[in-house]
Image: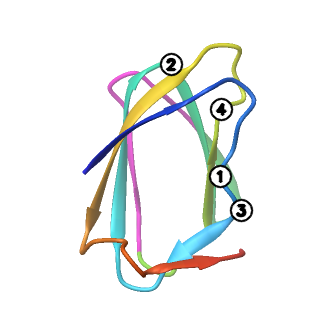
Amino acid sequence: MKHEEMPPGTREAWHHHAQARQVFFVLSGELTMESGGSVFCLRAHEAMAIDPGSAHQVRNDSSEPVQFLVISAPSTSGDRIEGG
């Protein structure tokens, strides 16, 4: 599990994981998640799961920082594949 904070206007590169399933849980702010051709806005105390092999991008489209937890199983160490 990782605790992350994204400043306003920042984003991760598009990627997917070969084996890891991830759950994103927002602690504060708004997190924009794009996956499977859909865009989701997660607010405090909302979560979203991403299955292995699903390309995704998280970003902060808001004007405030966003804090969230990322729970991954198994570990994402060496499991991240760049690109959509």
Q: Distance between the residues labelled 3 and 2?
A: 23 Å
Q: Which of marks 3 and 1 is in front?
A: 1
Identify the amino acid type marked 3: Gly
Q: Distance between the residues labelled 2 and 4?
A: 9 Å
**Is the residue 10 above or below the residue 72 in the image?**
above
Residue extent of the magenta highlight: 41-51
Q: How far apart are marks 2 and 1 (CA)?
A: 17 Å
Identify the amino acid type marked 1: Glu
Left or right: 73 as drawn, with respect to 36: left
**Residue 59 within the segment the image draws in magenta:** no
Identify the amino acid type marked 2: Gly
Q: Is mark 2 on a helix, strand or loop?
A: loop
**Which residue does the numbered mark 2 point to in the structure image?**
29
Q: Can residue 55 be seen in this view?
A: no
Q: In the depicted view, which residue is nearer to us: 29 or 47?
A: 29
**Which residue does the numbered mark 4 point to in the structure image?**
60
Which of the marked residues, 1 or 4, is nearer the chain's N terminus?
A: 1
Left or right: 47 as drawn, with respect to 14: left
Which residue is outermost to the front? 78
Q: Distance between the residues labelled 3 and 4?
A: 18 Å
Q: Which of marks 3 and 2 is in front?
A: 2
Which of the marked residues, 2 or 1, is nearer the chain's N terminus?
A: 1
Q: How is the image coloured?
A: rainbow
Residues packed near mark 4 inside 10 Å, few (<14), some (14 to 19) or many (20 plus) = many
Q: Which mark is residue 37?
A: 3
Q: Where is residue 45 in the image (x, y as percent from the top left)?
A: 32, 25
Q: Distance between the residues labelled 1 and 4?
A: 9 Å
**Which residue does the numbered mark 1 point to in the structure image?**
12
